[in-house]
Amino acid sequence: MHVQANGWSMYSLPGGSAAYKDFFIAVAVITTVFVTVATISVLAVFGAVIVPIPMLYYYSRLGRLPGVLVLALSLLIAMTILRALGFQAVFWYFFVLGSMGPVLSEVLRKDYTVEKTVICSVSVLLILILVILFYLSLGSVQAPWDIVGAHISTMVHENIELYSRAGISIQHIETLKENEGHIARLLMGLFPAFILAGTAFFTWLNILGGKWLFGKKGMWYPDFGDLTLWKTPDKTVWLVVIAGVFILIPSQVFRILGVNILIVLLFVYMLQGLAIVAFFFERKNVPVIFRALGYILIFAQQLLLFIVTGLGLIDTWADFRKASRKSD
């Protein structure tokens, strides 16, 4: 086995029965995670956080080759179990989620800044998703973008059916059904921003989750500094202005492009707003349970999320954390 200076295993397991025991424990844990996420619908929403973190841990601990074997065996066993139970599990969905662990591990080894870590990880994951889409298109008569469009159309239709069973007024349901195609086309146009922001957000959460887990296990992890002080470069605000200009241009192409850019930028400023919230939580020594409740409320209430995003944008000029440090 080759070991890096940071203590992470690189290639293979060391000798001894304990190492192989760890390998099979890893397979059992990852398989259990796959099956649990697939069978409990509530956890499916959080699958992008629940799956990659344990995979990141075992891949970093066991090494590259054992880590890849853990992922492959876990996928094989989980798919077999799920099919035996009658679940229609999507193999590629779990493959991408599981791959987030090894991708993050490889990038974290480089000891980049947090921005470069997120950008590199997201880039690799998006390339992987594109490769899978092109592969799936080879086995069908659909182009990659048609596969995405068909999935979005199905999702919109299923959600409208869900609303109709949830007691929404018939008038609203009829309006949604009449505009079903338009909604699907709109979402298809905004898909690049959604997939980019979504992948970046879950990568960010996995980086934070990995930092906590590796700290508990006494393993090396990159030192990203005090993330509560993180902020985007001030010049980024000009991209918001450019996106606004694109939206005002009477052209469908420019409008869609402008909205896509704006969604990604608002996501970035949301992260900055969350850093501000975390900063004041730290300053006021807010108990962990109340911090958790605060974050849950932010994501549960769209108005609070909008306010947090606004804080991140306004921080470009106000610099809330600098004012707080001066007062201290």
Image (cartoon, helix red, strand yellow):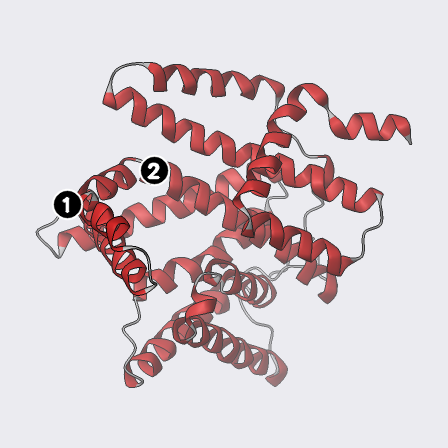
Q: Which residue is mark 2?
A: 192
In this rendering, the answer to whether 228 lies above or below 92 is: above
Q: Amino acid at mark 2?
A: Pro
Residue 55 in percent (x, y) is at 52, 65
In this rendering, the answer to whether 102 lies above or below 248 is: below
Q: Is residue 202 left or right of residue 128?
A: right
Q: Is residue 225 visible?
A: no
> Which quadrant of the structure image shows residue 306?
top right
Q: In front here: 88 or 13?
A: 88
Q: How many marks?
A: 2
Q: Which residue is mark 1?
A: 143
Q: Quadrant of the N terminus?
A: bottom right
Residue 210 in percent (x, y) is at 62, 57
Seen at 12% across and 49% down, the residue is: 142
Camera-near label (1 vs 2) is 2
Seen at 45% across and 33% down, the residue is: 264
Q: In front here: 213 or 158?
A: 158
Seen at 52% across and 59% down, the residue is: 49
Residue 58 in percent (x, y) is at 56, 67
> Which quadrant of the structure image shows residue 212?
bottom right
- Residue 93's mark? none
Q: First in sequence, mark 1 or 2: give its number.
A: 1
State the SS at label 1.
loop
Q: Amino acid at mark 1?
A: Ala
Q: What is the C-alpha distance between the residues marked 1 and 2?
A: 16 Å
Q: Is residue 316 visible?
A: yes
